[in-house]
Image (spheres, coloured by chain):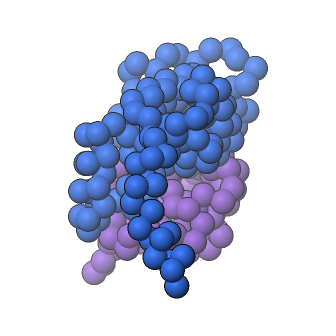
Chain colours: A purple, B blue
Amino acid sequence: MTVPTAAEADSLAERIAAVVTAHPAVLRLHGGVFGDVVTYLPGRRLTGVRVGMGDEPVELGVVLVLDRPIPEVVRALRHEVSRMCSGAAVDITVADVALPGETGPTGQ
Amino acid sequence: MSETTSAPTVKSPTTSASSPARLADDTSQGRTTIAASVVQKIAGIAAREISGVYSMGGGVSRAFGAIRERIPGGGTGGTNIAGVQVEVGEKQAAVDLDIVVEYGASIVELARAVRRNVITAVERMTGLEVIEVNIAVNDIHLPDADNNEEIPTVQAARVE
């Protein structure tokens, strides 16, 4: 993967977040087990997406709706995001699940 | 960071035919980490689906679950994960369940059904191989306990 500049990585993180949350089985983004999957943007933090520099993988943290098998969703997300990042590895953490119809807590 | 979630007690992967296929593509394209609470919820829901399971959890975890439900941010589905302990590795999971059965159910048959349903649900929904499901039946629920409370309401309805 080409090494992105900091500004490119930031806007890429936002585009990734938009694509990931657009998936019907993704309830929301999540900061991962330790809350470290975060992109620091000017004025705010984007929780749940971290674009690594160089060979580092892209990290995603998600909360999924439990209406279809998790591997299927993860595979779709990885395919989508990897394509946006010119084939970079994508580490995905499924931090929590919610039943269909149940909306999880809004806090992280 | 995902390394830290793997439990040391879960054995290294065996060459089982049932081991999920999706794991093959993980090494080159990125790692998938499934949090323990995810497996806990799925196992809890699957166990409760079996009729004959009255509730889940030992006395302590049931009391703890009742408290946690009242704490904001204490976790949704707190009732779903009462009585469920899991260890989750990168490819495998182990599940321990505490259940309260209804009187009249064959405990051996019930445990077998619970185990089958939990394994099916967790393997299908997470792709993890379930290496064991340990079930502890720690109480039996007698129908009398409920009937005593219901009798007055039934009689009240009858005289209407």
**Whole-percent x, y for residue B49 in the image:** 61, 48
Write the residue at 49% across / 16% down: B11
User: Which quadrant is the N terminus of chain B positioned in?
Assistant: top left
User: Where is residue B141 drawn, in percent x and y?
Assistant: 45, 40
Query: Observer-nearest residue: A46 or A86?
Result: A46
Left or right: B117, with B53 as reference point: right
Q: Which residue occupies 69% across, 26% down?
A: B19
Residue B34: x, y in percent? 50, 43
Left or right, A94 with respect to A42, comes to: right
Q: Can residue B15 be seen?
A: yes
Q: Position of residue A3 (x, y in %)?
A: 49, 55
Answer left or right for B116 relative to B54.
right
Q: Residue at x 25, y 48 (%)?
A: B64
Horizontal placement of A105 versus A55: left or right?
A: left
Residue at 55% x, 55% y: name it.
A2
Query: Residue A84 is drawn in which quadrant?
Result: bottom right
Q: Quadrant of residue B72?
A: bottom left
